[in-house]
Image: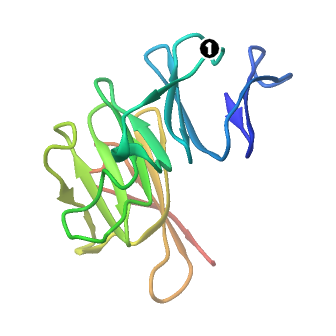
Amino acid sequence: FASNSTEIFETVDGGASWKSTSSHPEVQDLLVSGGRVFAATYEGLRVSSDGGATWTKLGGEAYSTPFSLAATSDHVFAASKALRRAAPGDAVYALHATKGAILSQSDGHLLRSTDGGATWTEILIDGETANLSQLAVRDDKIFAIKHPGSGGVIVLMSTDDGQTFEVRGEGPS
């Protein structure tokens, strides 16, 4: 599945061709989990269990403006006004999930939950606030981009659900 600002598309041949499945304004994120497709739109969180042919709105006011979706094996999370850091006013910028944890990026901080979001721990990298600009999850690995104060870029990787990160490369910005 993929989207642009007005439609959701599906491919069944690895991306060689695409067909429009539906129209939804301002799709911000898509997620396929447990045989269902989730769409975060400005109209709210939508779910389809028939490959995008029909969509049902989920939740009410709490998911009025979702912008990022992530899933663990047990839960689907929507980052919106409903999911925030413990400090008031720190909005979540992105969510990422591994098999055992959910990660939340917020105002330079990286938070990790291993209990479905009930509790959160801030992840420090080399004893400092994570301050990551990019984060991606692939299989059992988490890749991150950090911009240290001295300039340049550091590529980090975690193989333990974000508990620790190791440097995998460095370069100019």
Residue 81 found in image quarter: bottom left
Residue corresponding to mark 1 = 51
Residue 88 found in image quarter: bottom left
- Dot 1 falls on a residue whose secondary structure is loop
Q: Is residue 139 above or below residue 67?
A: above
Q: Quadrant of the N terminus?
A: top right
* Camera-nearest residue between 171 and 72: 72
Q: How many marks?
A: 1
Point out the residue furthest to the front here: 61
From the viewer's perspective, is 140 left or right of 123? right
Q: At 46% from the left edge and 47% from the top edge, which residue is drawn? A: 66
Q: Is residue 7 above or below residue 148?
A: above
Asked whether residue 161 appears in the rendered view, the answer is no
Q: Quadrant of the C terminus?
A: bottom right
Residue 136 placement (x, y as % from top left): 50, 48
Q: At 34% from the left edge and 46% from the top edge, which residue is drawn? A: 62
- Amino acid type, callout 1: Gly
Point out the residue furthest to the right here: 17
* Camera-nearest residue between 126 and 102: 102
Asked whether residue 110 appears in the rendered view, the answer is yes
Q: At 29% from the left edge and 74% from the top edge, which residue is drawn? A: 129
